[in-house]
Image (cartoon, rainbow, N blue to C red):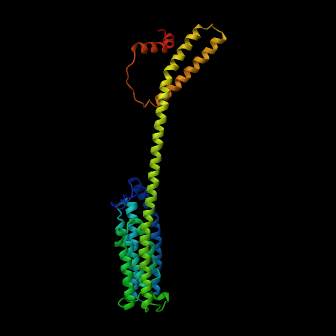
Amino acid sequence: MKRSQEPDAAPPGLHDDLPPDLAEAWARVAERFLNQSFVIRNVIALVLTGVFLLFVFLEPARWKVVWMGLTVVAVWSFAAYDYYRRHVARNLPWIPELVAVTILLFLTSVVWITGGIESPVIMVFIPHSIILGMTFGSFRRSILFLSIPVAFTALFTAGGITGFLPSTTPAFLGLGDGHEGGPVYLLVKGAIVVILVTSGTLGGTRLRKTFVRSTRETFEARQQALEDLASRNREILSVSSTLAHELKNPLASIQGLAQIMAKAAPGGGKEAERLEVMRREIARMGAILDGFRSFSLPLVGLTARPESLERIVRDVAGLNEGTAEMRGI
């Protein structure tokens, strides 16, 4: 089934910090990233499926097996919907806020069932927080998503200290009691996770702002360079068009005079041959000027001023004497 090549439309407000051209470019980059993340999510879903099989065969607590199974089903359902959106429905609207919350809830579920605050995968919150900061570009807009891992980390920490949450560390990991009973250890680990998640979100927003600023400066410099080049081209074109226009009349006069001289020269002599060569070259120059004038008309305006009509008539007659003679006038 053929995949749509058009990028998703950028959700309103997601790229407000970017100029229209840059927002479009960012949307294309985001689309490519989503295409890659689709493959990554499938790989993660396969890994979770393998972990679920470990739960099935090695975990004695059946409720943990059921929890892990439901999480795997939810992850595969999410991947299936993404496939349907991209390949069947073709660019069905994709809301980044909803995607972020959904993935965070999946991660939280996996962290919880693999040990809570003791989970070896709790650190996945950190790279995800960086991605969130880069996606939304504002720490204020990222607070809602940041609150999910922070709140659940605090909940897991409090549950490990007070014991009001059951231990979810998988039995097949063979960790024993570990440090679950050590309040200081749990508080320090929970604080480290919260600090790293918050720092990751801040770092992501700063990284996006740095990218936006440098890209905007590059974009503006490119636009200024293009405008300067266009202005320079207009000046060159104006000067060259005016020059071609001014050369046309004297060249026509020279061509006419050469025609008169060729007629007056003795036939078959060397002088007549040279004049004929000169006449052909003048004609070639005229054709080149005509082609250039056809390419670009003069861009300078006319300036009105008083002139002597007699002088104009005499000048025009003198310039066109040769052409008139050549045409039998």
Dividing the picture into quadrants, the one containing residue 132 is bottom left
Q: Is residue 161 visible in the rendered structure shown here?
A: yes
Q: Is residue 115 visible in the rendered structure shown here?
A: no
Q: Position of residue 245 (x, y in %)?
A: 47, 25
Q: Position of residue 188 (x, y in %)?
A: 44, 85
Outermost residue toward the right in this view? 270
Q: Residue at x 38, y 78 (%)?
A: 150
Of the pair 198 and 57, the residue shown nearer to us: 198
Left/right of residue 157 with respect to residue 259 in the rendered view: left
The N terminus lies in quadrant: bottom left
Q: Position of residue 227 (x, y in %)?
A: 44, 44
Q: Position of residue 66 (x, y in %)?
A: 38, 83
Of the pair 263 and 178, the residue shown nearer to us: 263
Dividing the picture into quadrants, the one containing residue 112 is bottom left
Q: Is 184 located above or below residue 2 in the figure?
A: below
Q: Residue at x 57, y 9 (%)?
A: 263
Q: Is 216 located above or below residue 144 in the figure?
A: above
Left/right of residue 273 with respect to residue 53 in the rendered view: right
